[in-house]
Amino acid sequence: MVRPLAIVLCLCTILLPPVASGQQPMVTGQIEQNAQLRPEEMLHFTDGTLAMMQAGVTEVAQTLEAAEGAGNMAIVQCISSRLITMRSLFAVTETSGESLRHALSTGATDLAQHELRKVTIAHAKFLQLKAEAAGCQGGNPVDGPVTVVVTSSAVHTRDETNPLDPDYDTGADPHDTSQFQ
């Protein structure tokens, strides 16, 4: 009985198209859960997400300052690139939160659901970037001097500064493009 069930499950996962192929399963599940929220729950989720994002931006900014103080430019660059995107996601979430409030006040539930989906996706991406920023300190960037050893070169040693041969025929003359020749 276990074997036929396993075969059916495998066939279902292979043959059925994914619900949202461009999104991670966790995000898709969160979007589906949030679609069932009442208006006050939508606002509570958005406010909580904004508070978490603000704290996350502050935390990563402090980590960046500490890395700058230590003078480790590889870690600074790694954290800085994530922090820029995190701040942008925070701004998007703020704007979506305001649009969500307006949509709920006017009774536009479809627009409110759309804005809530934007908040949910931004939240998931923010968490990913925060984890990546924390990973920047975990040894991923190279510490100390970097030595590059070239064993073979693709650079030609012959002199290529000579002008082109004026008698070289390309096979076709360009069309006249101007009446002023």
Image (spheres, grey):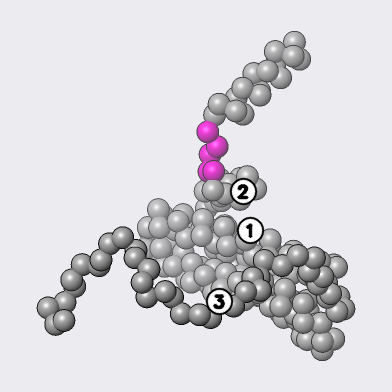
Q: Where is residue 45 in the image (x, y as percent from the top left)?
A: 60, 61
Name which of mark 2 and mark 3 comes first in the sequence. Answer: 2
Residue at the limit of the structure toward the left, as seen here: 179
Q: Do the residues labelled 1 and 2 touch (CB within 8 Å)?
A: yes
Residue 24, numbered label: 2
Toward the viewer: 55 or 80?
80
Q: Disc 3 marks which amino acid?
A: Glu
Residue 160, numbered label: 3
Vertical side of 11 occupied by 128: above or below: below
- 127 sits to left or right of 147: left
Placement of the C terminus among the 4 image quadrants: bottom left
Residue drawn 68% across and 61% down? 128
Toward the viewer: 157 or 123?
157
- 179 sits to left or right of 21: left
Whether residue 71 is visible here, answered yes or no, is yes
Name which of mark 1 and mark 3 comes first in the sequence. Answer: 1
Vertical side of 53 occupied by 121: above or below: above
Please report the bounds of the magenta region as a residue range: 17-21
In which image quadrant can residue 29 be found? top right
Vertical side of 119 occupied by 17: above or below: above
Residue at the limit of the structure toward the bottom, as seen here: 69
Whether residue 40 is visible here, answered yes or no, is no
Q: Where is residue 23 in the image (x, y as percent from the top left)?
A: 57, 49
Which element is circle 1 on?
helix
Residue drawn 75% across and 80% down? 76
Q: Where is residue 8 in the image (x, y as percent from the top left)?
A: 64, 18
Name which of mark 1 and mark 2 comes first in the sequence. Answer: 2
**Disc 1 marks which residue?**
124
Q: Disc 2 marks which amino acid?
A: Gln
Which element is circle 3 on?
loop
